[in-house]
């Protein structure tokens, strides 16, 4: 999503993706959910507006949650790829006769993936908090809706336990991201010369 605009930087495609990324970052999740219901349920009649028990009721909530993350990933990936494309080792790889695809896959993406991996870990927390809103917009049963109902009913035990569960999930994801840093970038491995 951010690789193509980086390779084609300055073109019309790049500008379209950049503006789409800005729109995706600016649109609140609940508004995106309501607009998706209006478009796909009310106007087109393609998808059910709320939980019906089949797989199709998950399409719109997934889109509403994923739009913000997709826009963020596209912008960060584009920026990271552009930074790596300007490095000397990329010029050297091209001078050796490697094709654009080989340079991109062997050298650029591996080096550009570290900041993207960081954003992935941070976006996980945003996805968890976004489920509270999305589950209420689409009337889905889940942890987010349970949290919202517990807050409305002042059930502090449930709220505390859900917050602790979500905090533990964020800690585990951040640990996994830290481990993946060493897999992606061998320079970060401890004990290697």
Image (cartoon, rainbow, N blue to C red):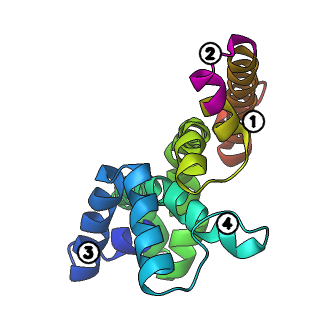
* Numbered disc in front, either 1 or 3: 3
| Residue 78 seen in the current view | yes
Q: Secondary structure at mark 2?
A: loop
Q: Which residue matches tag 4?
A: 58
Q: Main secondary structure of the magenta part?
A: helix
What's the residue at 78%, 24% (across, down)?
191
* Residue 154: mark in rendering: 2
Sequence-earlier tag: 2 or 4: 4
How dense is the environment of label 2, judged by Cα within 10 Å: few (below 14), some, or many (20 and up)? few
Across and down, in percent, residue 134 comes to 55, 50
Element marked by disc 1: helix
Q: Mark 2 and mark 1: span between their CA atoms?
A: 34 Å
What kind of element bears circle 3? Answer: helix
- Of residue 39 and residue 101, the one placed in the foreground of this image is 39
Q: Which residue does the image show at 33% across and 58% down from the upper left?
A: 86
For mark 3, what is the residue?
Answer: 16
Q: Which mark is residue 176?
A: 1
The disc, 1 or 3, on the residue closer to the chain's N-terminal end is: 3
| Mark 2–mark 3 distance (CA, rounded to whole Å) | 45 Å
């Amino acid at each position: 999503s951010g690789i193509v605009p980086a390779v084609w930087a300055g073109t019309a495609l790049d500008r379209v993706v950049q503006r789409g990324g800005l729109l995706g970052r600016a649109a609140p999740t609940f508004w995106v959910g309501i607009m998706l219901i209006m478009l796909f349920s009310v106007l087109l009649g393609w998808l059910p507006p709320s939980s019906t028990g089949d797989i199709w009721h998950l399409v719109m909530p997934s889109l509403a949650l994923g739009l913000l993350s997709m826009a963020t990933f596209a912008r960060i990936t584009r920026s990271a790829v552009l930074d790596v494309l300007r490095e000397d080792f990329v010029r050297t790889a091209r001078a050796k006769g490697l094709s654009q695809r080989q340079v991109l896959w062997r050298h650029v993406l591996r080096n550009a993936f570290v900041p993207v991996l960081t954003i992935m870990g941070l976006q996980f927390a945003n996805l968890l908090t976004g489920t509270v809103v999305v589950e209420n917009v689409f009337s889905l049963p889940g942890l987010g809706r349970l949290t919202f109902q517990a807050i409305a009913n002042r059930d502090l035990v449930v709220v505390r336990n859900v917050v602790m569960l979500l905090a533990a999930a964020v800690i585990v994801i951040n640990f996994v991201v830290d481990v993946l840093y060493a897999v992606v970038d061998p320079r970060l491995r401890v004990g290697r010369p």
